[in-house]
Each structure stands twice: as structure tokens, then as C-alpha cells.
Amino acid sequence: MALRLDEKKQALETLRHSAAHVMAAAIAALYPDVKLAIGPAVEDGFYYDVDTQKNISEDDFEKIENKMSEIIDRKEPFVREEITREKALEIFAANPYKVELINELPVGEQITIYRSGAFVDLCRGPHVEHTGQVKAFKLLKVAGAYWRGSEKNAMLQRLYGTAFSDAKQLRQYLAMLEEAAKRDHRRLGKDLDLFSSLDDYGPGLILWHPKGARIRDTIEKFWKEEHYKNGYELLYSPHIGRATLWETSGHLEFYSESMYSPMNIDDEDYYIKPMNCPFHIMVYKKQIHSYRDLPLRWAELGTVYRFEKSGVLHGLLRVRGFTQDDAHIICTPDQIDSEIADVLRFSLFMWKSFGFSDVRAYLSTRPEKAVGEKDLWDNATLALKKAIDGEKIDYELDEGGGAFYGPKIDLKVKDALGREWQMTTIQFDFNLPERFDMHFIGQDGRKHRPYMVHRALLGSIERFFGVLIEHYAGAFPTWLAPVQARVLPVSEDFISYANEVRDILRRENLRVEVDGRNEKLGFKIRDAQMSKIPYMLVVGEKEAGEKLVSIRSCKNGDMGRMSIDDFGKKALEDVLSKGIA
């Protein structure tokens, strides 16, 4: 069943926007010098950007929350007023941020303000009826934010909060935030020695440490194997391309702010690639294709580079260099229904394999300004909808929310904490086939334009890994764990047998290491637990004498003794099941 995004979320957004106004009113009452900028509702709450001489910290939150509670208790009505531009400039004359916003409004556009008690703000609304309806709220954090996101503008203070319709929902959300802090992939990445950032030598660029690289290698091997099984061929493309390539693709015209400066080679400008698709098209154009050649399914784990402002960089989730699990499907119009259905099925299979079962689709349709004939859009949108209906998954309709070059499906997955992450994208493109004059020879012997679909199942390896860390809290299922078993000799006398156990299990393609440190067994067990290693194999005199291992599971504790071969079989079953069966 499809629900429109605005129908589902409007009530909560209205409540949170009203909470932002209540917070702004409280700040204005406490800090008379404050100049308020903007304060929208966002996905998980609200914020307000403020300019004040007071350096607001979390120590001030209780005072602000108490003032908000006073305003809420007064049940002040939110009153909407339509005013002239001149009146608006008069009301906000002392606030340069509001004046800038007013002056940018198109001539003739209606200007509205909202009053609640003595507080007045420039706002389109809507709001709840009165402040008393903002009952369950909490301030969360404060951060710096440039006015309108530009480093050339003033640095403001951004106060974040959240609000819900009842106290129970708020408590559940705050408990989730507390658990999320424990699962933060940046902290776990450091604790488990998985990755780090290049920091001063390249913010937003990731260094994969040996254990993180083990997991990445496992993910990529599985990804490649499954793509081959699903009829894909793999491509590899360069990291740079001549400027003319990016001019043809339109990236230099529409995407240059996210691209890095050119490098000059043989008096020609070359750009490091922000996307893989133009190279895949170049492969297609190397020869003439018949309708009999199609569909073509070409995939690449292609590393791309995009400029992100330093203020938005966030661990693995927002980086400047990342590897897309990219693919492009080039097919005839009559093949599109089955191709989209296969892509969606493949996507759901991949997410289930990695332990994500709660998946929702978001279908974005034709915006007002779009390239391509309406019939193309209608057929493409219908193919997307048929695929969603065929898999019987819930979806939400984002009417007019598609890119200008084609409709799309976004898949959002819920992690162990119930947080939703936008990951998979299945995107039609009516733009690039035209720009690059792609065609195939049809049954009639004439040239026809193929359909082209961009598709990323996991999104990017970096962002996916960040989500994966937090989903499992670093305790990966055995098939993904960088170390699947650690052998713990009870003393130095049994290191030789421990090495023998390790070598036997390694020959079974299990990732095993030995803790040969001169430490007590209890210390070694605790360290293995903290390292979230699935299996600990304790070996002492009895085990060495009978060729056994005493098994401790990270999740289930003591599992008794087994022969080395029996443990190897059990561990391999665990690997093959991926912890799902």
C-alpha cells in the first residue's frame, strides 16, 4: 500500500516545527541580544540557528528547557498574520538574517509571521493550535553552523532538539540515542581497530586497517559472486577523465561544485571522477549493439571522489572518497519490467544476507522540470511500481520527487535500533543516453534509444560498513568477523598446540589467530570478548592430549569440548548460514 510522504509525516513535522518556535521564544527571553536565523523541523526533531554573544553549551539546556516549559504551560496560541514586505522589514529590522530572507522573497509572494504570546517569527507555518500541545520535548546538542551553509558567512550556534506527541515515545527515542552512542561506528572502529580517517593529511579519506580490510574483502567477494550469479559482468574504469567527458555527461555544468579542481595533462584538463557512469557508457559505445545483445548488466566497485564541506564529514557515513557498488543496466523498452523486478529482488536478497529484514521502498515520480517524453516516464514509473508490488513490500510515494532525468526507487533499511537508513537506489536515466547518443539496432534494422538504469545496492562500501558496524554493535556474524576464532592457550606450555589448532582451521579457510601472550586465561577471555570475536578456543593439558578444543561463544558462553574437525565443521556451517538460518 502506498502512502504519500506528506500525509504520513505532516503532523509530526508540524509539532516539531512548533517546538522549534517555543525553543526560539525561550532563547529570546533568556538572551535579549539574540538574533534568530532559521529553525526548521528535521527528520528526527528540530533545530534553530542563533547568533548571540553567549556561548551556549549543554550546561544551559536545563535553563532553556525550563523556560520552554513555562511557555508551554501558558498555552499561548500560534496566530498567523499576513503582512506586507514593508511591515516585515520593519518588524525584523534589527535582525540581518531575517532581512536577508525577506529581501530574497519573490515580489508578490505572500509574507506571513506567527505570534505566540510576545514572540513573533517570520514563518510560513503551519503550527499546532497553541504551545500547550508541545508536551514531550528534549534539547539534545549544540553545534556550530555557518549561515546558509557557507564558510564565507557568519558562524552561528545550532541548537538541536526533538519532540514527540507523548512522553513514552520520547523516552523510547532517548533510550535509542543512548544505545546508538554505544554503537557509534567511529568509536567502535577505533576500539576494534577497523579503520581511521587520514585526518590532517586528508579529511574525509579513509584508511582501512587489516581487520576492517578483512571484512571489506569478505563483503566484496560475496558481492562479486552474487553479481556473476545474477547475470552481471564486472567493469573497471579509470579514476580520471578528460574534461570533454564530463562536459558531455553534464557533470561540469550541473555538478561542478562537488568535483575537485582539474589537473593539467598534455595541456588538457582532466578531472578525478565523481561518478562511474560515463565510463560505462564509453564501454557501450565501443561497438554497435543489436537488440539481441541486450540486456547488458555491468557492475563496478568503483572508487569516486566528491567534495564535501568539512562540517558535514562524519566517520564512514559522509566522506570525500568512497567506493560505490555501482551498476548500469542497458536494455530495450520491452525488457524493462523484468529487469527492474530482478534488480529489486536482488536488492532484497543482499540486505537479507547481511542481516537486514525490515526494508521499505520510496517511489519518486516525475518533477515539473524533467527531460524525456511523458510516455517514457509513465512506463518507467509503472515498471518500478510493478516491481514493488511484486515483492509485496510497503512503499511511500514521493509525488514529483524524482530527479529531472528519471523516476527512482530508494530502499531504506531499519537497523537493530529501528533507525532507517537510505541505501539502495534504482534510478532511471533518460538524460545520459541522449547526451551520449546511445542506441541499439532494433528488429526493424533502425536505431533505437535504450533504457538505462543506474543501480547501487549497498550505496557505498564505506557508508554501508558504517551502518553494518552500528547494526551489529561491532559483534559481526561469523562469516563477516575479521577474526572468527581465537585460540587461547592456558599457559606458554600449550602455545605449540594452539598454533597447530590455528593452522588446521586456517586450512579450512577460517580466520583464526592465537593469543600467545603471557597473561592469565581470564584476561585473554575478557580481551577476546571485548574484541567481539565469535569463538574462543581454550586449550590446555587435556585438550592437547586428546586433540580437542574447549569452546566459548561470544554470544552463548561455554559450549563444551569438541574435536578440532568437529569445531571446524560447526564454524563453517555458521559461516555458510551467515548467521541467518
Image: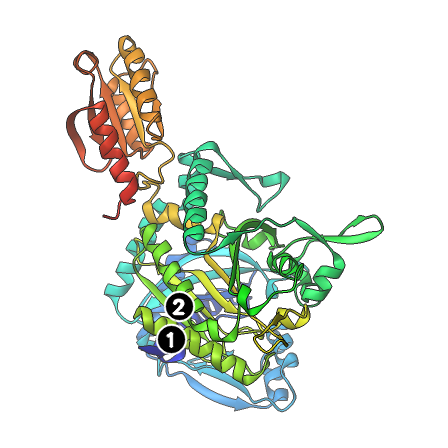
Label at residue 498: none
Q: Quadrant of residue 573?
A: top left
Q: Is residue 533 above or below residue 93?
A: above
Q: Residue at x 69, y 53 (%)?
A: 260
Q: Which residue is mark 1?
A: 386
Percent x, y of residue 492: 30, 10
SS at mark 2 in the image: helix
Q: Is residue 117 above or below residue 321?
A: below
Residue type at mark 1 is Lys
Residue type at mark 2 is Ala
Residues 478 and 112: in front is 478
Residues 369 and 110: in front is 369
Percent x, y of residue 82: 52, 90
Q: Using residue 511 as the reference point, say whether residue 379 is left or right of it.
A: right
SS at mark 1 in the image: helix
Query: In the orientation shown, which residue stands out farthest toward the top?
Result: 493
Residues 557 and 118: in front is 557
How much space separates mark 2 and mark 1, taking CA atoms? 8 Å
| Badge 2 density bin: few <14, some 14–19, many ≥20, Cα 10 Å | many
Give the mark nearer the N terminus: 2 vs 1. Answer: 2
Percent x, y of residue 245: 72, 60
Query: Is any atom of residue 531 visible in this view?
Result: yes
Label at residue 341: 2
Q: Is residue 128 above or below residue 521?
A: below
